[in-house]
């Protein structure tokens, strides 16, 4: 889950990272009050959860109240990558001498947490990776939750020369590492980290992505969620107790068990098809879940066929069959269903479906071949 810059800034500030003073506003009179408090010039920063706000015209420096009022209204009308600007962060404008990128993320190929820095800050790191990969420096934590001071000097020297700045940047990195682990982040990033006219280092932007799987440890974070940026299908699935991840293919997948659901997507893909989603209806036998899953999947107009792949253990095949039949009563099935059932109460399920004119497969191979063939016709 992503949070807005003003929210991430609060977290960084609490962790002892030097941030630029300011507050968020939704109305122009609030913005003017904040600006009076901190003093002009100020920067108005559109709070949308997409990168490249600067380039899109979402970040503006204003020198007085008149300019603030005019610019605030203009920003409120702006759409950045399709997202409307509702909140605007008002911060003190600082005299930027240098922009640096720093960030922490997980390198899954190396199975390690990596600290990244680049003297070419301000631009998106993905862009630097393409145009100037040598400018990106990396420091692996090597399984630790803090910086190893023996290896650190080489890394920090590659970005900062001045001893005071090296020390300040090291503190910022240490605190960023703390935030990263304390909140179970997948990304914690400051871009740009700036050096101002006095040589001070400050965070001029703040980005955090949380690992939602750790939310059971962080109830307080759930309320930071901005629903406008969540996939509505995924939200609904969560409410209905389904583990659902939206992808961009055209084969709907309804599977029981996360492992089988992963394997099903792999095999669809390897057979030349393209899965629409990951979906685990869970181990329990509940016809309602199949019905809800079908409703969500059929909302995607690109769907060409749906594969129901059930390996009955605790899940009873006849309950799944009942869910399918109930769904057929309640919703118009606009695409063919390919059903593979095996395991507990398989016989009852197949009889039930056959009575209602639905044939089934016993092996995954046959079912996947069929469903992929249907997407090609
Ligand atoms: P992003 O484009 O969405 O990553 O938004 P940023 O917060 O990184 O802002 C983009 C750019 O605006 C930065 O790289 C800076 O050049 C500029 N900027 C941001 N904050 C300030 C500020 O306080 N003062 C000045 N002068 N420029 C700023
Ligand atoms: Mn930025």
Image: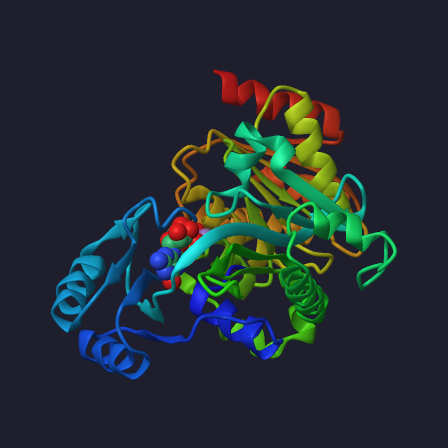
In the displayed structure, 248 sits above or below 92; it is above
Give the x, y percent position of residue 371: 59, 26
Q: At x 54% / y 47%, what residue is drawn?
A: 325
Q: At x 70% / y 62%, what residue is drawn?
A: 170
Name the image quarter holding residue 253: top right
How are the colours assigned in the image?
Answer: rainbow
- Ligand 1 occupies quarter: bottom left
Give the x, y percent position of residue 133: 61, 32
Asked whether residue 72 appears in the rendered view, the answer is: yes
Q: Give left or right: position of 73 versus 41.
A: left
Asked whether residue 231 appears in the rendered view, the answer is: no
Give the x, y percent position of residue 131: 53, 28
Q: Give left or right: position of 181 versus 68.
A: right
Please name whichever residue, 127 or 331, is drawn nearer the observer in this view of the structure. Answer: 127
Instruction: Please give the count of numbered marks on the rendered protein.
Output: 0
Q: Give left or right: position of 294 versus 73.
A: right
In the displayed structure, 32 sits above or below 133; it is below
Q: At x 40% / y 45%, what residue is drawn?
A: 299
Give the x, y percent position of residue 232: 43, 55
Please name whichever residue, 88 or 137, is drawn nearer the observer in this view of the structure. Answer: 137
Quadrant of the rendering where the N terminus is positioned? bottom right
Instruction: Determine the residue located farthest toward the top in the rendered image.
Output: 377
């Amino acid at each position: 889950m992503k949070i807005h810059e003003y929210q991430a800034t609060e977290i960084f500030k609490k962790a002892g990272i030097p941030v630029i003073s300011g507050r968020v506003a939704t109305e122009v009179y609030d913005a003017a009050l904040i600006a009076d408090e901190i003093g002009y010039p100020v920067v108005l920063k559109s709070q949308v959860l997409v990168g490249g706000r600067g380039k899109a015209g979402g970040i503006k420096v204003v020198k007085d109240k008149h300019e603030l009022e005019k610019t605030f209204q203009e920003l409120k009308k702006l759409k950045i990558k399709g997202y409307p600007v509702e909140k605007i962060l008002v911060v003190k404008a600082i005299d930027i001498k240098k922009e640096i990128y720093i960030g922490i993320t997980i390198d899954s190929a190396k199975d390690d947490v990596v600290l990244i820095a680049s003297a070419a800050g301000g631009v998106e790191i993905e862009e630097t990776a393409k145009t100037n990969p040598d400018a990106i420096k990396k420091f692996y934590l090597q399984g630790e939750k803090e910086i190893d001071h023996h290896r650190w000097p080489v890394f920090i020297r590659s970005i900062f020369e001045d001893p005071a700045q090296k020390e300040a940047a090291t503190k910022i990195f240490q605190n960023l590492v703390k935030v990263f682990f304390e909140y179970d982040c997948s990304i914690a990033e400051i871009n740009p980290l700036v050096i101002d006219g006095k040589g001070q280092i400050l965070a001029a932007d703040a980005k955090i992505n949380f690992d939602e799987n750790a939310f059971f440890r962080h109830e307080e974070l759930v309320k930071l969620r901005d629903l406008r940026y969540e996939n509505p299908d995924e939200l609904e699935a969560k409410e209905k107790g389904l583990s659902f991840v939206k992808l961009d293919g055209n084969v709907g997948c309804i599977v029981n068990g996360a492992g089988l659901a992963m394997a099903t997507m792999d095999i669809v893909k390897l057979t030349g098809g393209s899965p629409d989603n990951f979906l685990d209806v869970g181990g329990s036998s509940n016809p309602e879940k199949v019905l809800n899953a079908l409703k969500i999947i059929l909302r995607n107009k690109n769907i060409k066929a749906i594969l129901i792949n059930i390996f009955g253990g605790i899940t009873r095949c006849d309950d799944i069959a009942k869910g399918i039949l109930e769904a057929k009563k309640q919703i118009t099935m606009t695409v063919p269903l390919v059903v593979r059932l095996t395991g507990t109460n398989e016989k009852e399920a197949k009889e039930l479906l056959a009575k209602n004119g639905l044939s089934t497969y016993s092996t995954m191979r046959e079912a996947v071949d069929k469903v992929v063939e249907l997407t090609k016709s």
